[in-house]
Image: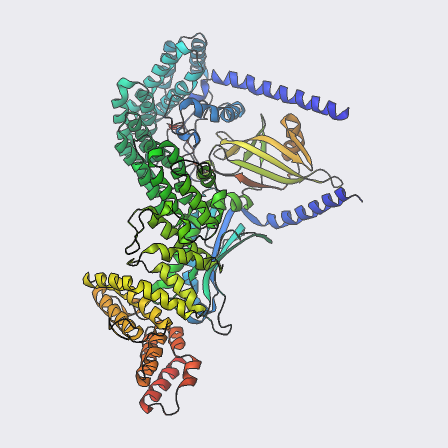
């Protein structure tokens, strides 16, 4: 068996795994979770107190992340189905001076994320120190709400400081599955069930559709690039996002134009429906997507 | 051969597809039936429909082209989006309630007139048709869409017909407003038409003010369009105020930030730009602050030094979280790198990059010494102040990363701080590192050099009854004296010792708590490490009972407000084991009682 064939089989197996995981995921939904596991605080705060703090901070972070990234639904509460992504901020203790003494190390906020069973590398978001080793005024519990307040400030920095937001835009957002369905339309248009107004996508945003194409013996990973995002004004998918097919990769072959359309996009209109995953490969925020060149495009 | 045929087939399919799109587009430009669609109330969970964007009218402005299309000039915006929207329009099926009967005939007649270049009469027919039936709301909406279509299609008409299309758009919007004076969209779009005529700029302003007063969901759009109008009429202060309102409401709005920058760049000097950069810094928008500053240097070379200083200031802020050494690889870093040979700024740029790459000795900096005073704090706003803060920030950054570069950065920060600097952060950072390494001689030297300034500053905070800062300075000084085991002052001033400073810090905390009327859990109190330092000081001062009482009182106080871990920390096992067997019976009973309360 050739190396190429082995690689293809590996890709297919990986895709199948991702697809199986993704089926249970809710497109667009990212759940924000905050946990306090530093022993100093788990000893000093009751479980109910900790949960109250964790829920409040998670809600604050979710609300703040929705400002620069309305493309995604940020939830602080677990819903019925699995989210497309889980973003977790964990308060941990590192570098204990005395291994047996909780509170003798640094207290930091550590961010991690996973989509299904896939971990997202968030190492570029550095641990945010809450209390240094030599901070002689560090709180021990949450007396006066100081720990909650300090944690809130630290956690919100993920969504308020531009370097962090830039990193999230360029490295995190592209991992969030936004839709599991697309509809090919006439004139090489592809309709995506993303609410146009709520998503606030700038016109230079780009989406990517991934699915396993071909037959059982010649399955390929197909990646389609969609550009020209615009509002869909008519049915089907009225009010959602309309895009234009740009180009695609079928296995290792790059295609565009009519050929690319017929090979990569057209099969998506056939039965049985293919399981697809849609991601944002580029997202620019547009505060008023119904305004172009200073003109309001609709009356109401 | 097969590959060649495949390419030819692909090319042929592409050509056919493009031809089809092109044909659809041409037809669409003449299609007026879509504006007469029945108005559908959008379902609650569904975003409302929009008029499909096609080509952009002579709308706004011309801020920097590198920004988003939102506030580019009309033609630029048209080019940016037309290809997509035309394709979208081509695909859109006919409207749900297509014109029929008399309407269809009127529309066809109007379209024929448009094709023949008779815009004025076509406009009359389209408007008459709009008000022929339906509710006033439906008529208003149809007239709005007619206005939009004239406004967007106008640019596709021959030059001599564009003015007529413009008049037709004005007429349609004016009639929209007669039926619905609260139509913010019509007010806005009509204003965009007016502002293109110098004689009607005031009318445009009135319309935009009316739109803003509606306070509807598009208020930020109206504000930005009015900002553009004021910018173009050279009323830059008003323009900046309007754009700032939008930026304050949504700091991520790229159009607002672009407008603010554009307005600032039209000034005679960099003052407004620096104010904008300060706002960006305050919002954590540090990447934009750096980009703006470096771009501003080219526009205001005479203010290059102030802008370069602002770069250092931004990099020293808590909002700049990346590794300082990585700045050179950012857009702003690359822009700045082009100035390394600049006659006036080159030295400053080179020194800045060197400091960011690795810690530099004080003597290696020259350009950044401007404003340095060995006896006092650096001059406010000076290059030296910015560099001192940057060096301290680098020290903090590498300390957090447990990187040995933190010490030389703190050394640079301390060297640049001046002896009477009220900000103890750099000196505390260095003292913390030296204490951890037990470098007592270096600590002593640090104290000898800089405590006079800290004491002097403390004198000022005491005189101003600033209890909080007095507490902080006393706490810092008390800990630093403790690091070098200077428990009591060996001479004058009598207060230059750890015991006195920490006792007085506790007193300052008491006054602060009284002044602020803080509830017990929120009150300032000595932290556990300071309690232990004070206890140790008293022990060295041969005051064993006082030393023990210090810890017991603090532990009881912590326990009273529920800070049990803090209480346990000041009664740590090593300390308990060190207590003599013949400890005063009363103290022993008190210790046992507190231990019992804490469960230890």
Q: Quadrant of the C terminus of chain B?
A: bottom left
Residue nearest the observer in this picture, B451 or A96: B451
Q: Where is residue A39 in the image (x, y as percent from the top left)?
A: 47, 69
Q: Which residue lies most toward the front here?
A: B363
Among the 4 quarters of the image, the one containing residue B348: top left
In percent of width and height, residue A292 lies at 41, 28
Which of the two residues, B425 or B372, is positioned nearer the viewer here? B372
Q: Is residue B461 left or right of residue B298?
A: left
Q: Whole-percent x and y of residue A22? A: 60, 48
Q: Which residue is drawn at 31% across and 81% down?
A: B541
Q: Residue at x 63, y 37 (%)?
A: A223
Q: Say left or right for B99 vs B455.
A: right
The image shows residue A272, relative to residue A163, as above or below, that is: above
Q: Quadrant of residue A76?
A: bottom left
Please state which of residues A266 and B479 is positioned toward the viewer in this rendering: B479
Is residue B187 visible in the rendered structure shown here? Answer: yes
Residue A74 makes an appearance in the image? no
Q: Which colour scheme is used?
A: rainbow
Residues B142 and B415: in front is B415
- B78 above or below B531? above
Quadrant assignment, res B423: bottom left
Q: Position of residue B564 (x, y in %)?
A: 38, 74
The residue shown at (32%, 63%) is: B449
Please give the count of numbered marks on the rendered protein.
Answer: 0
Q: In which quarter of the image is the N terminus of chain B?
A: top right
């Amino acid at each position: 068996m050739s190396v190429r064939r082995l690689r293809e089989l590996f890709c297919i197996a990986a895709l199948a795994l991702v697809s199986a995981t993704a089926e249970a995921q809710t497109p667009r939904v990212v759940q924000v979770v905050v946990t306090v596991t530093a022993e100093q605080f788990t000893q000093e705060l009751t479980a109910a107190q900790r949960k109250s703090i964790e829920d409040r901070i998670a809600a604050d972070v979710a609300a703040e992340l929705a400002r620069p990234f309305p493309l995604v639904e940020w939830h602080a509460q677990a819903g019925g189905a699995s989210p497309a992504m889980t973003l977790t901020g964990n308060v941990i203790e590192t570098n204990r001076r005395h291994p047996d003494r909780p509170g003798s190390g640094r207290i930091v906020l550590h961010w991690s994320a996973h989509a299904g069973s896939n971990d997202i590398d968030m190492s570029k978001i550095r641990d945010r120190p809450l209390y240094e080793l030599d901070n002689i005024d560090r709180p021990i519990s949450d007396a006066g709400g100081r720990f909650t307040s300090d944690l809130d400030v630290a956690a919100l920095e993920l969504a308020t400081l531009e370097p962090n937001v830039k990193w999230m835009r360029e490295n995190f957002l592209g991992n969030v599955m936004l839709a599991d369905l697309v509809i090919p339309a006439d004139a090489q248009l592809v309709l995506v069930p993303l609410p146009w107004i709520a998503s606030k996508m700038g016109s230079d945003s780009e989406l990517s559709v991934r699915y396993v194409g071909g037959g059982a013996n010649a399955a390929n990973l197909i990646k389609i690039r969609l550009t020209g995002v615009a509002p869909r004004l008519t049915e089907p998918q009225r009010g959602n996002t309309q895009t234009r097919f740009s180009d695609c990769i079928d296995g290792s072959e790059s295609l565009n134009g009519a050929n690319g359309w017929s090979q990569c996009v057209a099969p998506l209109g056939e039965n049985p429906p293919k399981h697809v995953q849609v991601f944002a490969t580029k997202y620019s925020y547009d505060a008023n997507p119904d305004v172009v060149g200073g003109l309001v495009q609709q009356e109401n | 051969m097969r590959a060649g045929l495949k390419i030819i087939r692909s090319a042929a399919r592409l050509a056919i597809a493009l031809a089809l799109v092109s044909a659809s587009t041409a037809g669409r430009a003449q299609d007026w039936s879509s504006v007469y669609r029945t108005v559908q109330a959008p379902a609650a969970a569904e975003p409302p429909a929009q008029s499909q964007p096609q080509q952009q009218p002579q709308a706004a402005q011309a801020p920097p082209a590198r920004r988003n299309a939102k506030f580019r000039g009309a033609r630029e915006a048209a080019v940016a989006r037309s290809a997509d929207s035309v394709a979208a329009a081509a695909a859109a099926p006919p409207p749900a309630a297509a014109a029929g009967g008399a309407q269809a005939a009127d529309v066809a007649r109007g379209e024929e007139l448009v094709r023949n270049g008779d815009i004025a009469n076509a406009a009359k027919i389209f408007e008459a048709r709009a008000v022929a039936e339906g509710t006033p709301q439906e008529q208003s909406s149809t007239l709005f869409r007619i206005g939009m279509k004239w406004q967007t299609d106008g640019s596709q008409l021959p030059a001599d017909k564009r003015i007529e299309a413009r008049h037709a758009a004005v007429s349609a919007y004016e009639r929209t407003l007669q039926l619905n004076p609260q139509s913010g969209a019509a007010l806005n779009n009509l204003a965009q038409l007016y502002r293109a005529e110098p004689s009607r700029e005031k009318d445009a302003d009135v319309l935009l003010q009316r739109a803003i007063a509606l306070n509807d969901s598009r208020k930020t759009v109206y504000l930005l369009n009015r900002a553009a109008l004021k910018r173009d009429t050279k009323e830059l202060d008003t323009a900046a105020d309007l754009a700032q309102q939008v930026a304050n409401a949504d700091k991520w709005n790229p159009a607002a930030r672009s407008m603010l920058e554009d307005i600032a760049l039209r000034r005679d000097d960099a003052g407004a730009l620096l104010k904008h950069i300060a706002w960006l810094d305050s919002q954590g928008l540090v990447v934009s602050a750096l980009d703006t500053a470096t771009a501003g240097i080219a526009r205001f070379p005479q203010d290059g030094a102030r802008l370069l200083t602002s770069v250092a200031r931004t990099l020293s802020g808590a909002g700049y979280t990346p590794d300082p050494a990585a700045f050179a690889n950012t857009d702003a870093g690359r822009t700045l790198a082009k100035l390394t040979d600049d006659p006036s700024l080159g030295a400053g740029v080179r020194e800045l990059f060197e400091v960011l790459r690795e810690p530099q000795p004080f003597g290696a900096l020259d350009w950044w010494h401007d404003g340095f005073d060995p006896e006092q704090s650096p001059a406010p706003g000076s290059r030296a102040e910015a560099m001192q803060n940057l060096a301290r920030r680098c020290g903090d950054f590498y300390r957090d990363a447990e990187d040995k570069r933190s010490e030389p950065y703190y050394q640079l920060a301390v060297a640049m701080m001046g002896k009477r600097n009220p900000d103890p952060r750099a000196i505390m950072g260095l003292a913390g590192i030296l204490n951890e390494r037990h470098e007592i001689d270096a600590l002593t030297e640090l104290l000898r050099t800089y405590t006079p300034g800290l004491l002097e500053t403390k004198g000022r905070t005491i005189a101003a009854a600033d209890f909080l800062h007095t507490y902080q300075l006393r706490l810092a000084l008390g800990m630093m004296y403790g690091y070098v085991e200077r428990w009591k002052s060996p001479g004058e001033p009598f207060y230059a010792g750890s015991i006195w400073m920490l006792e007085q810090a506790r007193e300052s905390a008491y006054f602060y708590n009284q002044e602020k009327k803080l509830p017990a859990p929120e009150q300032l109190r000595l932290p556990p490490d300071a309690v232990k330092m004070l206890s140790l000081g008293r022990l060295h001062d041969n005051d064993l009972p006082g030393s023990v009482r210090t810890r017991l009182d603090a532990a009881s106080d912590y326990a009273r407000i529920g800070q049990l871990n803090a209480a346990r920390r000041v009664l740590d096992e090593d300390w308990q084991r060190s207590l003599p067997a013949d400890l005063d019976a009363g103290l022993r009973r008190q210790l046992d009682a507190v231990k019992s309360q804490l469960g230890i």
